[in-house]
Image (cartoon, rainbow, N blue to C red):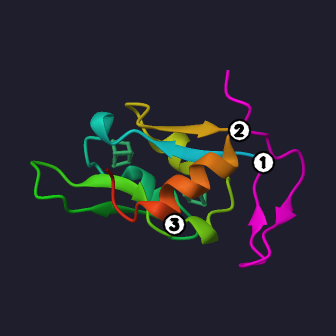
Amino acid sequence: MSSIPESKEAETTPETEHKIPKKFPWVIPFSCEGCGDCVEACPTGSITLVDLGKKVDKAWITSPDTCIGCGKCASACVVCAVQMTEYVEKALTRYREHPTPE
Ligand code: SF4
Ligand code: SF4
């Protein structure tokens, strides 16, 4: 098991003063069908569809620092291509380091 700590309480990061949610969306681009339902469900515009030159655009957290961890994107996805994870720091690093799906 990974030893990445879970975020128990909302905290702020020094560089952004962003409140870190207790859970964070983990997008699985392989499973995404590009329907856009998660994008429509998101109240903060944190998840968008990215054109990778494939048959369908893929959902991605393009604005991780505005995500409030509400889980509406995950609830909206009927193919479970977005799951809420407690590995918040790992997810934040993933999206900050990869502005588009890898
Ligand atoms: S709701 Fe699911 S399938 Fe549709 S764009 Fe979002 S992640 Fe992809
Ligand atoms: S968890 Fe909420 S704020 Fe974050 S991307 Fe999903 S719908 Fe948007």
Residue 83 lies in quadrant: top right
Nearer to us in this view, 11 or 74? 11
Q: Which residues are magenta?
A: 1-21
Please state if 1 lies on the left or on the right of 93 as rendered. Answer: right
Mark 3 near ligand 2 (CB under 8 Å)? yes
Mark 1–mark 2 distance (CA, rounded to whole Å)? 6 Å
- Does residue 71 appear anywhere in the picture? no
Q: Position of residue 29 (x, y in %)?
A: 33, 42
Mark 3–mark 2 distance (CA, rounded to whole Å)? 18 Å
Mark 1–mark 3 distance (CA, rounded to whole Å)? 16 Å
* Residue density around tag 1, few if under 14, some if 14–19, many if 20 or more, within 10 Å: many
Residue flagged by tag 1: what amino acid is it?
Answer: Lys
- Does residue 9 appear anywhere in the picture? yes
| Residue at 54% from the left image edge and 40% from the top image edge | 75
> Which disc number belongs to residue 46?
3
| Residue at 26% from the left image edge and 49% from the top image edge | 34
Disc 1 and disc 2 in contact, CB within 8 angstroms? yes
| Residue at 80% from the left image edge and 76% from the top image edge | 14
Q: Looking at this view, name the residue that lies furthest to the right.
A: 9
Q: Which residue is mark 1?
A: 22
Q: Which residue is mark 2?
A: 86
Image quarter hosting the N terminus: top right
User: Between disc 1 and disc 3, whose residue precedes?
Assistant: 1
Residue flagged by tag 3: what amino acid is it?
Answer: Ser
Residue 65 lies in quadrant: bottom right
Please state if 71 lies on the left or on the right of 94 as rendered. Answer: right
| Residue at 86% from the left image edge and 62% from the top image edge | 11
